[in-house]
Amino acid sequence: MKPKAGFLSLAEEVQLYILILLPYRDILRCSSVCKALRQTYLSYSELQYIVELGGQQLLHVPDINPEHRISVSQRLQLLRNRAHAWFKLDVHTCTTIFIPDQCRYSRTSSIRGVANGHLCLWDTNPDAHTFDMFMDPAQNLIAVAYSVTDHDPNWGDAEMFYIDLIALDGGGVHPQAAGHTLFLSELTGYDVIKTDPDDIKLEGFGKHIAFWRTVEMLDANNDFHNMWELQIWDWQHSTTSSCVLADDIGPLYDCSADFCFLGNDRLLVFSHKLKLYSIEDTTQAPQLLACFLLPISAMNIGCTCILPMEDSLQPPMQAQQKMWTSDPQHQLFILSLESFCSTLLFIISTTMFFNLDFSEEMPAEILWDDWGPSNSRAFQNHMHQRIGVSGNRVLQACPVDGTTDEQDHPMEYRFHAMDFSPLAIERRQGVGRVVKEPSTIIIETPDSPPQVALTTNLPYVELVSDGTFSYPFDGIWIDKDAVYLSRYEFQIELIEITPRAAD
């Protein structure tokens, strides 16, 4: 007789130690093998917490302050409450934030100054034109892009741009920055004639800060070019950039490009194609990893990339810390594509950009059918629709049919919430509607054939709010566990999703 020795014969504490080392999906598989392992899973909050984090596609943040340590069971309950709260939005429990007259500025409607519950309104030198700002409370950082010029930049020649790095808690120079100001590098072989002041973007992630603009340029032969330009800094080590991208803007894609970070080492750039770059080495230009084709040939593409870093660590001046953070490998971004006679909204998962096999056999251009349908959902986008994204949750404010005024402006809106995380789909607990089946939309095109059927099938859970709201707004932002709606009257409506004390 051979002695029987197996996993179930081990002490329960040893089983727990082994299971904790497994990915969350394997923990779930083990818990479904037999009643004994199921009971082990139910007995330990540590295992359930790993599953809840993985299912919501979040990463654990280690404790950095023992005085504010929260038990695993408390973390688990908060995480579950957080997930369920998104389907209980109450549009009638708003708090109005009034922006003082002296702090109002032209870019307020974009609410780019909201991060981790902080609202930043930047007041600059009257001789300077501020174009954009980026705020990262996790690193105690504000970056401001501006130019100093003697004339209105809407009419001007080539302005000199600067990016100042400021400490959020004190307003002085950031102590970890390589210098107070980042400087743009000249694009070799070109002379800048004019920068489009309405197409400038400042963005950051971790050690990177990126500045994007579209420009009019002359080359060495005095030939005219419309171009986009992107410069990236490792802001803690250098005030100049060697990581530069630029390309011509084709006549059919005027001012139709955008970008976003995918973690610390990857970058997505959108134009009439979607390109993935490596930015691991910022001492050289970004390295192209893959190129993805879009499903249709559009007359114009307006790209909007929304990829917020929600749930990051709190800044040093706050005692509380975050318990989890979004996983860059499992988030969503929004791509708005203007076709021949309609605007399409693509919700795309970032997962595939980290699962590619970058071998010599990979095609130079990946066809839409080989990457798009299973990694996205496509919708027809109403011109007055507003959308926000946080991790794997998308919130749309959609006009209510039959409630427009004489100018055809919506008078009432309703929230549509979508959750693309695996646990929401597997364990919705009777809340919302699970959408797993493919959906198809018909797109009118100027080409042949005149109509294209576009099918996508990324699964999600959808919930439509019971209540409606009637106040006008021009932007929506999801930050942590709250929704911010910017008003034309320089007000911001705050809708709490879960109490901030639970953080």
Image (cartoon, rainbow, N blue to C red):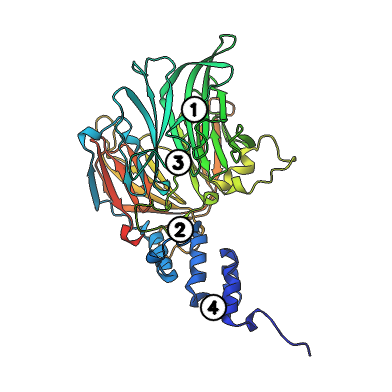
Q: Amino acid at mark 1?
A: Ser
Q: Nearer the viewer, mark 2 or mark 3?
A: 2
Residue 433 numbered tag: none
Q: Which residue is mark 1?
A: 256
Query: Can you give x and y, in whole percent of width and height, for residue 179 in the image?
Result: 45, 35
Residue 442 visible in the displayed image: yes
Q: Secondary structure at mark 1?
A: loop
Q: Secondary structure at mark 4?
A: helix
Spatial separation of the CA atoms under disc 3 and disc 1: 15 Å
The residue identified by callout 3 is 306
- Judge from the rendering whether residue 392 lies leftward or rightward of residue 117; answer left or right: right
Marks 1 and 4: which is nearer the front?
Answer: 4
Q: Give the spatial CA distance, label 3 vs label 4.
A: 40 Å
Q: Quadrant of the N terminus?
A: bottom right
Q: Residues within 10 Å of mark 1 (few under 14, many from 20)?
A: many
For the point 44% across and 69% down, the residue is: 72
**Residue 126 versus residue 460 in the image, above or below:** above
Say which residue label 4 marks. Answer: 40
Task: Name the mark on residue 324.
Answer: 2
C-alpha separation, residue under disc 4 versus residue under disc 2: 24 Å
